[in-house]
Amino acid sequence: MNMPQANFDYKRNGEWLELTVSVLKSLATTAVKDEQALQANSHPHHVRQWLLALALFPAKWINRLFSIGGIQMVDDVVKLRTFIPVEMGRDVMYELAKLPVIGRHNEVPVLFEDDWCLVLDKPAGMPVHPSAPGHRGTLDEAAARHCIKSGELMPVKHIHRLDDDTAGPVLYAKNELAQLQLDEAMRNKEIDRRYQALAQGQLKHKQGTINEPIGKDRHHNTRRKVSPTGDSAVTHYETLACYPRATLLKVRLETGRTHQIRVHLSYIGHPLVGDTLYGGSDPLLKHQALRGELLAFKHPFTGQMLTIHAIEPDWFRQVRERYAIL
C-alpha cells in the first residue's frame, strides 16, 4: 500500500483520525473510477469501498474498522477510529503496570514519541517482554506504565527486540495501523538498527560482512551457534577504534536473529568483552559490551524518515575508556 509522504499533516480528534477527501485523493497513486467518487456524508460502506480503491491503507485494517463502526464521514471529512485505547482490566500488561515498580529501573528514557509510535531507551539487564505469564520488570511493562502516566492508554506493542543485557532504542507501535506498517517494514528490512560493540582482540579487517546462518545449540538451551541448518543471518561491521586488547566496532544488522552480533563475532574469533556465554570475559563487566546506538525508520503514517540516537550508557563508556588505556 502507499502511505502519505513526509510533508503530510494529519488531524487527530480524540480516537479519530480525520482526513478530507481532497487530501486523500491527492495522496493516492491508484486511479479511482468515476462511479466510485465519494460524496459528502457518504455511507460508511461506500467510504470503505472508496478507501480500499485508493489503496492508501492496509485492506485488513480498513475492513476491521468498518466491522466495529470505525469509519464515518461528516461533510467532506473521512473519520477513521485509529487511536483506540485499551480496556483497563482486560490488558495484562496494563494490569502489571499498575502494580508497584520492581527492579532498579524506575524510569526508562523516552527517545521519541508521537500519536503513532514510541521509542524507549532500554537499559541493560531489562528484558523487552515477559518470559512467562506474570513476569515483571520488562520494557513492555515500562511502556504501558509510561502510557498510564501520560493519560494515553494506547495498545503499545514492540516491533523488534534486544537481548536482556543489551542497551539501546526499542521501537513500539501505539495503534494497530502503526503496528501493521512497522511490522511490514521489519519484514522488508527497512528498519535500520546500528550498534556499538567492544570485541576482544584486534580484527584482521577494518570492516567486513559476516554472512553465516544461525541456529539453536542443542547442547545449551540459551545459546545460539553458526549452523548450516540455521536461519540466514547477515552482520556488517566497521572499526571505530583499535585498543591494545579490544576493538570498538560499529555494527549494522540486515537480519535479526537471536544473539546475532554475539554469535557472529565469536564465530570469527572475537567474542564481545564480558560475554561469557560466547567466550568473552572481563573482570568487571558481567554482561556483553554491546549497545544499540541508532534506530532509523520511516514514520508509519507520514512516511518521514526518523533517525533516533540513544545516549551512551555510563557502563559502556567506562568499559570503553578502560580498554583504551589497558
Image: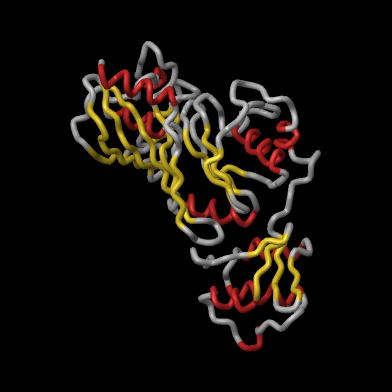
**Which colour assignment does the render follow?**
secondary structure
Residue drawn at x 43%, y 22% as measured from the top left: 315
Res. 57 image quadrant: bottom right
On screen, 244 above or below 30? above
- Furthest residue to the top? 283
Q: Is residue 320 left or right of residue 71?
A: left
Residue drawn at x 36%, y 15% as measured from the top left: 282
Q: How many marks?
A: 0
Q: Quadrant of the C terminus?
A: top left
| Front residue (pair 251, 221) | 251
| Front residue (pair 40, 312) | 312
On screen, 164 above or below 170? above
Q: Is residue 256 left or right of residue 140?
A: left
Res. 177 image quadrant: bottom right
Residue 1: x, y in percent? 53, 66
- Furthest residue to the right? 89
Residue 188: x, y in percent? 45, 54
Res. 257 image quadrant: top left
- Furthest residue to the bottom? 34
Residue 47: x, y in percent? 70, 75
Residue 321: x, y in percent? 32, 22
Q: Is residue 48 left or right of residue 312?
A: right
On screen, 170 above or below 73? above
Residue drawn at x 32%, y 37% as measured from the top left: 250
Residue drawn at x 58%, y 78% as measured from the top left: 25
